[in-house]
Image: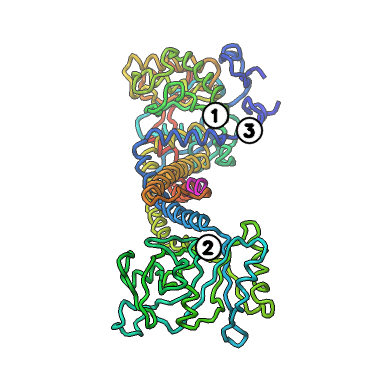
Amino acid sequence: MTRELGENDGPREQAVVRSDQPLGNRIALQLDEVSKEYPGGVTALRDVNVEVPAGDQVAVVGPSGSGKTTMLSIMGTLERPTNGEVQVAGHDVGSASDAELAGLRAYEIGFVFQAFHLQESMTAVDNVALGMLYTGRPLKQRRVAARAALERVGLGHRVEFKPKQLSGGERQRVAIARAIAKRPMIILADEPTGNLDSKSGGEVIGLLHGLASDGATLVLITHDEHIAQGFGRRIQMRDGEVVRDESK
Amino acid sequence: MSTAAATLPRRERTDTARLPPHELVGSALQGLRTRRLRAALSALGIAIGIGAMVAVVGVSSSSQANLLATIDSLGTNLLTVSPGTTFLGANEVLPDTAVPMIEHMQNVNSDVAIYQISGASVLRSPYVPSEQTGGIGVDAAGDNLPQVVGTSIVSGHFLDAVSNRYPQVVLGAQAASILQINQVGGHLMVYLGDTWFSVIGILKPVLLDSTLDSTVFISLPVAERMFQTQPNPSEIYVRANVNDVAQVSNLLAPTADPQNADGVQVSRPSNVLEARAAAKGQFTTLLLGLGAVALLVGAIGIANIMVISVLERRSEIGLRRALGAKRRHISSQFLTESALLAALGGMAGLALGAGATEVYSLAQNEPFVVPLYALVAAPAAGFVIGALAGLYPATKAARLSPTEALRT
């Protein structure tokens, strides 16, 4: 194994192998002929085939209603496909129980949402620590990791601030810290800049690039062509289908 | 290395999501803390219900404790000896030797006998028809009756040496009120039999034997002279040594009538009163039922609040699912929240009920008693009720689709 993303809680830097180094044939996400239909006959995804090797950075673009978010939800095991096979971090989602999928999300997947979803009553550090709640690690340890993650996103001076006291860009950086603090294999971001002005949006994207290049797999939904250009691989969707999948 | 092995993540073992119990409680408390006012208001319903129940139990225990304390102060060492009935239902008669025999017993501190005078009635004047006795009985009694049965005089004094020679009478508490005499003085007389008797005293109620209250007392020599009363006691009151009550009680019958011990009935009045005190607690069932209704209303209030809370916190639920919460984690979080809320309500109710009991016992000058079990039962009842009330909202929360929840 070339990657060594161990259990140690120290700074990640030493433990990480850059993504441009050989990764073997490890696959982070694999969607095989995946379809998703909702009750009422709405087809959100139709025969989607996507394979994301570990460490890749992928932008998903497409108009609204094209199935981007549904695909991300399936990648994040929040939803199961109607048809097809999904493998996430080596686990077959189809045969996994609710508890097993929850475990997968707790350890291997970090989400970043357009609406941040921060808990207003909690400080930044506790919001980030909440991201590791379901790993069963003690609060003290989680807070240490949370502080480190906040340092990494440049909010070391804001750890005791509540979301209301932070700007939009800062809030999204707290949310990113929450996603990366447990050092997941996969980071899934759904329009993370959708609620931000272009300056803080740019900062957030830069941050995600930097964090993911430490070895995590990043799948990011955006409608911003400019942001998508910054990714090595872009998946274009329309009407629930992948219409283009190009790599630089 | 096979392909399957190559796609395995960095952990070979599959970790499952975990939520240690203290973190579960922490999450639930966090949920309550962010909505303090609402939590307090919905817990209030439970607090009132449990408070009402604690107060009912507390007030009845307090008055019960008061009664028991009164009984205690009157002494539980009083025994009564009376003639029983024969096998065929006829009344037995105590021998006139019973009193001196008992007086010579060991461990008997004091004793007094009363002798029923049949056929005599007490009236305010000879013009009142003699049938209108008002249920007042006439007894001859020894001059230490008040001391032995544990009562005292409201007004005047009890029978004494003078009463052995002259027609004097002392009234029991109820007899006095029937005759409408509330204090002695002047030349207050009652018409007893066919003689005027001067009233020399009125007794306080006798808690240990209330039959004495509706009786008037004259001395035995006067009774023998005027009513030909036989010296066979109708009742003997005996004070035993506190530590030897059982032993004295066993020996009383054969001592009173060695020839016919079976015809003698011995009882301990304090036992009867204690049983009555215990029974008094049972009257609270109806009030407890009212408390239960208040609790039910409180439980519905909590269920209602939790349903609203689940609707409002959809995004939090979605987030937690995304962060790795199992369905069971979500349901147990809401269940714990609801149970803790009601348990806090239960504790507040305990304080409320104890406060009400304290106020009552101060007002009634009774000892303050809240049964020990209430200290555990009040919060525990709240906890259980809260858990039941939270069942439906918690299931609803766990069933929420995470993607839908995150969309809001």
Res. B148 mark:
2
Q: Nearer the viewer, mark 1 or mark 3?
A: 3
At which x and y percent is residue A83? 51, 42
The residue located at (47%, 49%) in the rendering is: B369
Q: Nearer the viewer, mark 2 or mark 3?
A: 2
Amino acid type at mark 3? Thr
The residue located at (32%, 85%) in the rendering is: B129
Q: CA distance from mark 2 to mark 3?
A: 84 Å
Q: CA distance from mark 1 to mark 3?
A: 17 Å
To which chain does the residue with label 2 belong?
Answer: B
What residue span does the magenta drawing correspond to?
Answer: B374-381
At which x and y percent is residue A34? 50, 38
Question: Which comes before the other along the chain, label 2 or label 3?
Answer: 3
Res. B280 mark:
none
Evaluate whether label 1 is on the same chain as label 3: no
Locate residue A18 relative to residue B5 in the image: left or right. Answer: left
Local secondary structure at mark 1: strand
Please indicate, yes or no, whether residue B171 appears anywhere in the rendered image.
yes
Q: Residue B264 versus residue B382: which sits nearer the camera?
A: B264
**Is-magenta flag for residue A63?**
no
Say which residue label 1 marks: A29
User: Can you tell which quarter of the image residue B99 is in?
Assistant: bottom right
At which x and y percent is residue A53? 56, 24
- Furthest residue toward right: B1
Local secondary structure at mark 2: helix
Relative to residue A239, is residue B222 depicted above or below? Answer: below
Locate residue B130 relative to residue B108 in the image: left or right. Answer: left
Q: Residue B131 versus residue B352: which sits nearer the camera?
A: B131
Evaluate whether label 2 is on the same chain as label 1: no
Predominant secondary structure in magenta? helix
Say which residue label 3 marks: B14
